[in-house]
Image (cartoon, grey):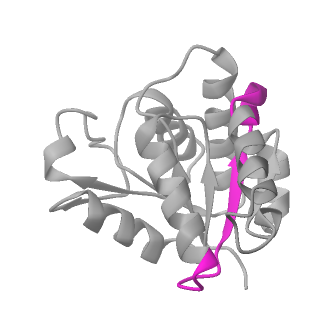
Amino acid sequence: MSIQSIAVFCGSKAGANGLFEVHAQQLGKILAQKNITLVYGGGNKGLMGAVANATMDAGGKVIGVIPKILLEWEAQHDGLTELKVVENMHVRKKMIYELCDAAIILPGGNGTLDELFEMLTWNTLNIHDKKIILLNSAGFYTHLIAHIETMTEQGFLYENWRERLIVCDDPNAAIDALV
């Protein structure tokens, strides 16, 4: 299966390390260069805005999906190829999953982790089989990866999590892992 669209889950804030934004911008540019549509949460702030703007600046296609409640919070992006406004967060996540062929997780907060673990859970339950890439920019997810290893060691996971979640350290490696 060729990858036509990638969901990117990331923070609506930029975070404390400048590399997070650099990686978001690099990823956006690569998506545009490879003619892969970016599907994301529709915001124009933080890493969300960085990846969307970089994709569009490089001539790429961007589809944003944002719930009504977050229109002001995340400052919806008015310059996208397409912006879908939906009723709630559940509809947002489901639509993003339906529109993508794979997902890349950049640094972010609670919402980003929610999206990561829902995709992982759905993948484990065979609701979908889309590849999931964790972009461990500047070691942001190193502690989370260690905790997932602990869940494995303590017998809480049904299979080797590394078969479901690919960890990469830079945007080029993330794209290479998908195609």
Q: Residue at x 53, y 75 (%)?
A: 122
Where residue 79 appears, x then y in whole percent?
32, 44
Q: Residue at x 61, y 41 (%)?
A: 106
Name above or below for residue 96 compared with residue 153. Answer: below
Query: Horizontal placement of 143 versus 65: left or right?
Result: right
Where residue 125 appears, x then y in whole percent?
57, 82
Instruction: Find out whether residue 94 is within the magenta segment.
Output: no
Label total for image = 0
Extreme residue toward the front, this view: 154
Query: Horizontal placement of 66 versus 142: left or right?
Result: left
Q: Quadrant of residue 164?
A: bottom right
Q: Quadrant of residue 94?
A: bottom left
Q: Out of 28 and 163, give the one closest to the viewer.
A: 163
Q: Out of 19 and 93, give the one closest to the viewer.
A: 93
Q: State the quadrant of the N terminus.
A: bottom right
Name above or below for residue 71 compared with residue 124. Answer: above
Please give the range of residues in magenta: 124-142
Query: Horizontal placement of 152 versus 87: left or right?
Result: right
Where residue 147 appears, x then y in whole percent?
71, 43
Query: Horizontal placement of 167 versus 40: left or right?
Result: right
Q: Residue at x 81, y 55 (%)?
A: 153
Q: State the quadrant of the C terminus.
A: bottom right
Instruction: Find out whether residue 134 is within the magenta segment.
Output: yes
Q: Residue at x 63, y 76 (%)?
A: 124
Where residue 151 appears, x then y in whole percent?
71, 54
Name above or below for residue 101 compared with residue 63. Answer: below
